[in-house]
Amino acid sequence: MAAGLFALVVFASAGPVAADDAPPADDGVLDAYFRMVERSQAGQPHWISPLITTTPRLNERFRYDTTWQARARDVTLTNYGSGKGVELILAAPVALTLGVPGYVVRDSGSVSRGGWADETFLLKYRFVGADEASGNYVVSAFLGVSVPTGSDALTAGKVVWTPTLAWGKGWGTRDAGFDIQSTLAVSVPAGDKGRIGVPVVWNTAFQGHVLSDKLWPEFEMSLTHWTDGPNDGKWQAIATAGIVLGRFPISGRIHFDLGAGYQFAVSEFRTYDSGWIATVRMPF
C-alpha cells in the first residue's frame, strides 16, 4: 500500500498530461486515473478543507494534523496525527480516506503516558455538486469506521460506525467568496454502548477567502450530544477560530497547505477547556 501511494505521488509530480501528447487509447493506467480525478474535482466547488469540519468535497491528498488540548486537573492531551491520512478518489463520486492512527500523549504534572489510537477509515459519496460558475454547492454522505487496534488505554474496544450527512454552499468566485460547510454525524459502537456512549456531532464551518485565493480565514462550531455512556444526556459546544493557507504549488500536481486554529469551550459542560490545532496537507 505504501509503495502504491508513493508511486501515485511521484507520478503526480510530473503534472497532467496534455490532451495532444497521446491518443486516449495509449494512456497509461495512472494517467487515466488522474484524468478521472480532474473530472471529479471539476464537478464541485474549489473551497479549501476546514480545520475541524470534514469537507463534503472529494479530495486527493495526504493530511496530517496535530492537536493540543488543555483539560481539567492540569492535564494536557496531545494527538499526533489525529487519525488523518491519505484520501484517494476511487471513482467520479467516491473517495476513501485511509487514516493514520494518532499517537496520543497525556501529560499530567511530571507524568507522561502515550499510546496509539484506533485505526479509522472514511468512505465518501458525493450525491450532487457544482463548481463556482454553476451553483457553488455540494451534498455528500460519509460512512466512517473505527477499528479497535489502539493501545489499551485509548481503544474503544469495539468497532464504531459513523454515518454522516454533509453539505456545503458557497457564494462568489474561485478568487474571492464565502462558503458554509456542515456535517451531521452519529457514532454507533458495535456493542457496549453503556460504556462507550453514542455521540451525535454537528459541525459547521464559516469560511471566506476575500483578500486572496490563498488565504482562508474561518470560524467553526462543533455541537455534541451524548446518549448512553458516561456523558449520557449532556451537551458540549466547542468554537474554533483559525486560518488555512493554500494551495501553494510545489511540482506538477503536488501542492501544499497549512493551517492553525484555537479552540475554546462555550458550554458549561466540556471534555476539555481549550486547545490548538495545526494541519499540514499535500494535495496531489
Image (tube, rainbow, N blue to C red):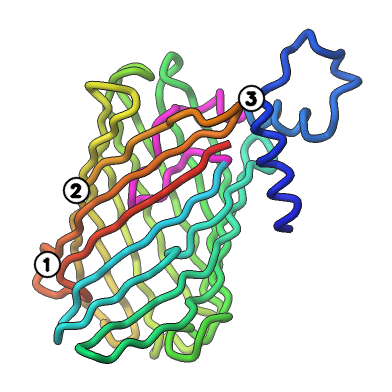
Which residue is denoted by mark 3 in the rendering?
39
> Image height check: is 103 above or below 140?
below
> What is the CA distance from the residue labelled 2 to the residue labelled 3?
33 Å
Q: Residue at x 50, y 86 (%)?
A: 151
Q: Residue at left 32%, top 54%?
A: 278
How many other residues sit within 10 Å of disc 2, few (<14), some (14-19) or many (≥20)? some
Instruction: Identify the residue at horizontal 75%, vertical 50% (top origin).
Output: 4
> Is residue 153 rendered to the left or right of residue 70?
right
Which residue is at the front of the view, 72 or 258? 258
Residue linked to disc 2: 241
Contact (Cβ within 8 Å) of mark 2 with mark 1: no
Q: Which mark is residue 174?
A: none
Amino acid type at image mark 3:
Arg
Is residue 57 covered in magenta? Answer: yes
Q: Amino acid at mark 1?
A: Ser
Q: Is residue 177 above or below residue 117?
A: above
How far is the residue under mark 3 from the one under mark 1? 43 Å
Asked if the residues shown at circle 2 and circle 3 are in contact, with their CB atoms under 8 angstroms apart, the answer is no
Q: Which mark is residue 267?
A: 1
Horizontal and vertical percent position of residue 21: 80, 12
Examine the structure image and report whether residue 56 is included in the region drawn in magenta.
yes
Left or right: residue 19 compared with residue 277: right
**Residue 258: percent from left, percent from top:** 37, 43
Q: Which residues are magenta?
A: 40-60
Dominant secondary structure (helix, strand or loop) of the stretch shown in magenta: loop
